[in-house]
Amino acid sequence: MSPSDSHAIVPFRVAVPQADLDDLHDRLARTRWPNEVADAGWDYGFPLARLKELAEHWRTRYDWRAHEARLNQLPHFTTEIEDQTIHFVHVRSPKPDALALVLTHGWPGSFLEFLEVIEPLSRDFHLVIPSIPGYGFSGPTHERGWDATRIARAWAELMRRLGYERYGAQGGDFGSGISQALGVVAQEHVVGVHVNYLPVRPDPDVPVSAGDEARLDKIRALMADRPPFQALQALTPQTIGYALTDSPVGQLVWIAERFAHWSDPATPVDDERILTDVSLYWLTATAASSARLHHDVPRGTLPCKVPMGVAVFAHDITQSVRPLAERLFDIRHWSEFESGGHFAAMEVPELFAEDVRAFFLARLEDERLATAG
């Protein structure tokens, strides 16, 4: 690529080599299974019978080509930013002057999380849905330092290349931190940040209700008993990456366990969608590079000053506490939902899309009134 082409935005088509699919099926057929104690349930980890069921579905009934064809109905692109491939979906609204939104996924998700909300949100907004560096079609990263702030700077550059001067940011999981960071590094361009995951720390100086105290107890328990996957990916992402990149069943259980534990039992993510997400990680060999974000991401809250909207889903890993959030952020919108979990855009897409729409349309109205005044 010549220097003049370094900022090029190139159309991208999903086209996995058949040899990679054949290799996947062959590896699945040769899985070496561990034994399991009687009546183990979830006491020792992911149940053997359930994992065998998922693996057999993946090997014999799951059709990547069908999902690939669906994905190729969307407008995909890639560009190079800081010598890193950035893949993204760019869907324009029929409204030419619509606000643009950057939608950012987390781990173990992907841009696939947003498939069900593209149609409803694109009625009112242009949508830019990137794959985080190191994830999926953005491919592995090749140097350290791709933390939330650096990713946010890449998003700001991407939006500049696409010609968007003003835009909103939305995210959950790592996407929440990246969206907040975008509100810091591109504050003059970001009209607002909407998140569906906003952990907060207890503060003895902030009075909270009994219900909020229960939420804080949940956060304290999570902080005191760090999940094993998080510890491994934060401390030794390369080490766990060898196993996940070599064994499809290892990659499958690593991700499927999170969907099992983090989704609302009433709105589970179905097996086909789980397998598509797992397939994306497997076929792009991004287990290790995606895990590095746990290692590189800084701890603590970013000083994001742009207006923020928060959607709290009852079955997420944690539920944010409004009085504590308001000490740190300019909260303009707060919604509480009785259904939905960590993967809200997949589990309850209608609720998710409507909350995102409501926040950003309100932001536009606020700006209109401020200008008129």
Image: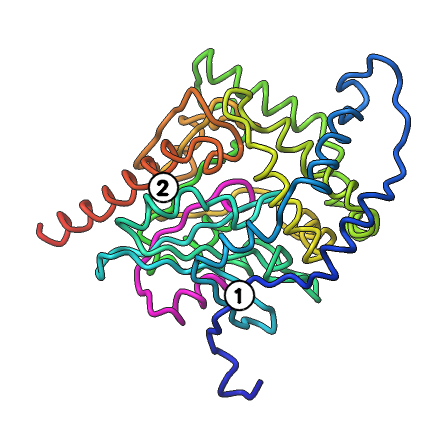
- Tell me the quarter of the picture where residue 257 sits: top right
Identify whether 80 is placed above or below 355.
below
Q: Which residues are magenta?
A: 153-177
Residue at coordinates 52% horizontally, 47% vertically from top-left?
112
Q: Nearer the viewer, residue 120 or 229?
A: 120
Helix, strand or loop for disc 1: loop
Q: Position of residue 100 (x, y in %)?
A: 32, 56
Can you identify the residue that label 2 sits on? 308
Residue at coordinates 42% horizontally, 20% vertically from top-left?
338
Q: Nearer the viewer, residue 85 or 347?
A: 347
Q: Amino acid at mark 1?
A: Arg
Would residue 118 appear left or right of 23 to someone viewing this image?
left
Q: Nearer the viewer, residue 259 or 188?
A: 259
Would residue 273 appear left or right of 373 to someone viewing this image?
right
Helix, strand or loop for disc 2: strand
Instruction: Determine the CA span between mark 1 and mark 2.
Output: 35 Å
Q: Which mark is residue 13?
A: 1
- In primary-sequence order, the first of circles 1 and 2 is 1
Q: Position of residue 350 (x, y in %)?
A: 36, 33
Discs 1, 2 touching: Cβ within 8 Å: no
